[in-house]
Image: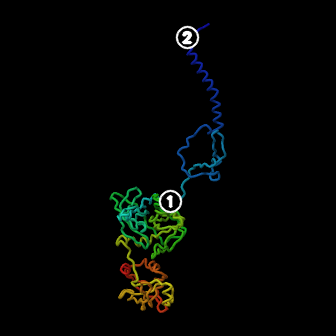
Amino acid sequence: MKFYSRGQLILLSVLSSLITGLLLLGVGLPILLANLRDNPGQNVVADAGPPPEWVGPVTADESPQAESLRTIDLFGHAERPGYLEGQAVQRLRPFSESERANIEIYERLNAGVVNITTQVMAINWFLEPVPQTGGSGSGSIIDPRGYVLTNNHVIANAHRVFITLACGTQFDGTVVGTDPENDLAVLRFHPPPCMTLQTIPYGDSSSLRVGQKVLAIGNPFALERTLTVGIVSGLGRPIRISRQHVVRDMIQTDASINPGNSGGPLLDSQGRMIGINTMIYSPTGGSVGIGFAVPVNTARRVVNELIQYGRVRRGWIDASMVQLFPALVRHANLPVNQGLLVSRTHRGGLAERAGLRQGSTAVRHGRNIIYVGGDIITSVNDVDIRTLADLFAALENSRPGDRVRVGVIRDGNPITIEVPLANREEVLN
């Protein structure tokens, strides 16, 4: 019998393992290759490239490649074409023309929309003034010097105003001027010389059409620079914003407007401001698709005066007028039951010189003395006048010195008088 040394035994063991491995490789490799050829993709994960953009679930009818799609369960069994029940499939789809337009407008102009917050003063139990957080809203930068257009109700009764830009920088703001009749206000902050501000360009609200696409940018519920899209739902809506003030020609839109959107811009499809988002109709406090915006043409008319004078100078008929009511109509046996009775004219004033006639007989109504027998105003520039709010609205666009056609009932007969207007502040104050 032949004996091997320890070194020889180790060498024989290594040679035996090598031969066995080569035999297995020769037999198994053809089987593996055949298996891969018959079942492509089952055991190999290919590089899919960059992840596609998320666009939502796809059904077999929506995708021309749906027949080639297969899903594999954990046991390697192929499922039906399409996608697993309840699971979304991603696919790459280019933006539509409308989507590209929305994205372009938002990316270009959102930096021109600011967030406005206020601080108000309250009185505590010790009758001491205590600052408290007030309201919040939105605004549009309309001038690179730092002028901002917003709603008057956003900053009403504010002790301090803060303006926050898209970059997060906050500035102290000052109230330049207010126009409560149109619920508009102009604020200003002072950016550093090195800062370039994005402004919102003016459009033209006179050419709007129902059905036209509009976009709203604002800060609803403190969610900064939110974009919503809708259409013009109605035009020329008269909306009462206070007991005496009615804003005519308001724009109605179904673009979502919520608390915090007030004062933000309503834009057309070119990115031009055609309205200032102001209020919503809602039984719940949230948007139900009925929002209203002040036409930008109204804002353009008053902004320069707000910047120059801090207020809007408007014309007025310099006379004391009383809105007709049933008891007065019955007592004076008036020929109409709606309109404004001219109780007194200002001695030597514009209305008196124009021929407007005042009352001659005094009657008491509560603590007030009314003079009856004078002219009854029923129209101004062919706009029907039934209430004082109608007169405010009819003269909203006027200026001191303008001449208006005043339709009156005198001794039961209708006549027209041309009356120059005085300064409203001087007449009413």
The picture places residue 314, in percent across and down from the top left corner, at 39, 78
Residue at the spot 36% in from the left edge and 68% down from the top edge: 176
Q: Residue at label 1?
A: 102
From what the image shows, is residue 282 above or below residue 425? above
Residue 5, label in figure: 2
Q: Residue furthest top?
A: 1
Q: CA distance from mark 2 to mark 1?
A: 86 Å
Q: Are marks 2 and 1 in contact (CB under 8 Å)?
A: no
The picture places residue 52, in percent across and down from the top left corner, at 54, 48
The picture places residue 5, in percent across and down from the top left corner, at 55, 10
Is any atom of residue 143 visible in this view?
no
Q: Residue furthest left?
A: 193
Q: Quadrant of residue 20?
A: top right
From what the image shows, is residue 27 above or below residue 101? above
Residue at the spot 50% in from the left edge and 64% down from the top edge: 257
From what the image shows, is residue 11 above or below residue 429? above
- The quarter in which the N terminus is drawn is top right
Q: What colour scheme does the image use?
A: rainbow
Residue at the spot 43% in from the left edge and 77% down from the top edge: 396
Residue 268, label in figure: none
Say what amino acid the circle numbered 1 marks. Asn
